[in-house]
Amino acid sequence: MTLYHLGIDDTDSLKFGCTTYVAALLIEELIKYSKFIDYPNLIRLNPNIPWKSRGNGAVCLRFHSDMSEKEILDIAMNYVEEYRDHKDEKNQPGIVLLKGEVPKCVRDFGNRGLYEVLTLDEAIMLMERMGIHYRRINNGRGIIGALAAIGNLLDGDYTFELIVYRRRELWDEKRFVDLNSVINFDRENKPYTFNNIDYEEERLLITPHGSDPVLFGVRGESPHIVRMALDYIKFRGGERWVVYRTNQGTDAHLIRKYTINELKPYHAVVIEGRVSKKPTIISGGHVIFSISDGTGEIDVAAYEPTGDLRMIVIRLMPGDRVRIGGGVRLLDNGKITLNLERLEVLNLLKEISVNPICPKCNKSMKSEGKNKGYQCKKCGRKTRERMVIKIKREISEGIYLPPARSMRHLTKPIQRYGLEKNGWNEEVGEFYGILLNT
């Protein structure tokens, strides 16, 4: 049997469809003739790409099969054509099929797809050079994500997601998933599930809102944990389910450290520096501050949906050392700013230097000019020393994140710190099923 890696991307739009659903149907077909060597992989790529449809997720299926490359590509093409959004001209599905082991150049391409902006020409040139077969519809921009998904072997940290799909006649209907049953599932299995409930607003985070096949998706640390959701959660209209191994909740996109003068629009970056301008609240409740690292200065924005994270940001002071994870945004005026996703306070300013106080008059002394010292304007007393005073800070050093409802798929929640995995070589368990009478 031959080893294959089948990547699929961009079968959906903002209004319709779902790439993972096409993958679920493909699994049902391919599993008849193939042996999967891994759980289906759901790879979230750079979330800052402006032309992404929704979560910028691509799928890779890895399996041994006696089928030919043409047979596999034909099957995949048929499902993609049937279930893609034909009404959206921006819909540009891509299918990539790699035979054998994944070469380093493809792994590198996949890794860069987590934080850079990759081009269609680059993907095509790489596949032509390596003899990788692909199919594309319309302009086929989806081959970028499909190839990147193949290149992401999830050989570092990873999590799992159980996705339950609903019957086609219900795609335009309101979803029924019982909130209390999800809360029960989440509390019973903590800390091994994450980002399923926003407890602050008592809001479900596992259900999308569009006219698409997904009923709900539950995130957790193991296949066993997420499959338990089928026993805990009360729902209606389910058709089938799939367990994906994924890079969600791993900070996989925040792995490249940049200097400010290296930043490019739409990249996912980590930068480190000192707060250079005091945080201010602007219209809409957003908080803006600046940091500098010696190579440049950039504004950082904590937008209103980041919730209480803004209350941490507003307490920063010039001189505080921070590490920022986020996406580079291109403004209408051509400048760039950084959208805050993760704040790590490395070192807080504990004391500040101010003009000295005259011990006789108890008044602040005035500077006489650069390197000329200070003088009390009332009594004439002079000194060359500034005064150092300790300040009380209302925040602590550590990592701060937005609430779960505002996190991106890739952002690693606090509860996952210490639960990271390193590589995968486990047996593939049950990952697919049909639902009856739901």
Image (cartoon, rainbow, N blue to C red):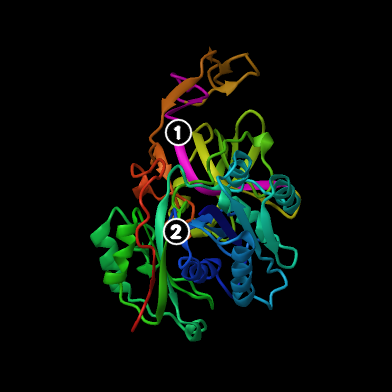
Amino acid type, mark 1: Leu
Say if residue 205 shows up in the picture.
no
Amino acid type, mark 2: Lys
Residue on which the image places disc 2: 35
Q: Cβ–Cβ below 8 Å for labels 2 and 1? A: no
Q: Earlier in the sequence, mark 2 or mark 1?
A: 2
- Observer-nearest residue: 411 or 116? 116
- Observer-nearest residue: 217 or 258? 217
The secondary structure type at the circle numbered 2 is: strand
- Horizontal side of 273 relative to 90 (left or right) equals left
**Residue at coordinates 59% horizontally, 73% vertically from top-left?**
79
The spot of residue 274 in percent (x, y) is 55, 33
Is residue 111 covered in magenta?
Answer: no
Residue located farthest toward the left when viewing the structure as drawn: 188
- Foreground tag (2 vs 1): 2
Q: Residues within 10 Å of mark 1 (few under 14, many from 20)?
A: some
Residue located farthest toward the bottom when viewing the structure as drawn: 169
Q: Quadrant of the C terminus?
A: bottom left
- Horizontal side of 312 relative to 72 (left or right) equals left
The spot of residue 416 in percent (x, y) is 36, 48
Say if residue 160 shows up in the picture.
yes
The stretch in magenta equals: 335-362
Residue on which the image places disc 1: 346
**Residue at coordinates 44% horizontally, 53% vertically from top-left?**
37
- Gap in angstroms between the C-alphas marked 2 and 1: 48 Å
Q: How many marks?
A: 2
- Horizontal side of 416 relative to 305 (left or right) equals left
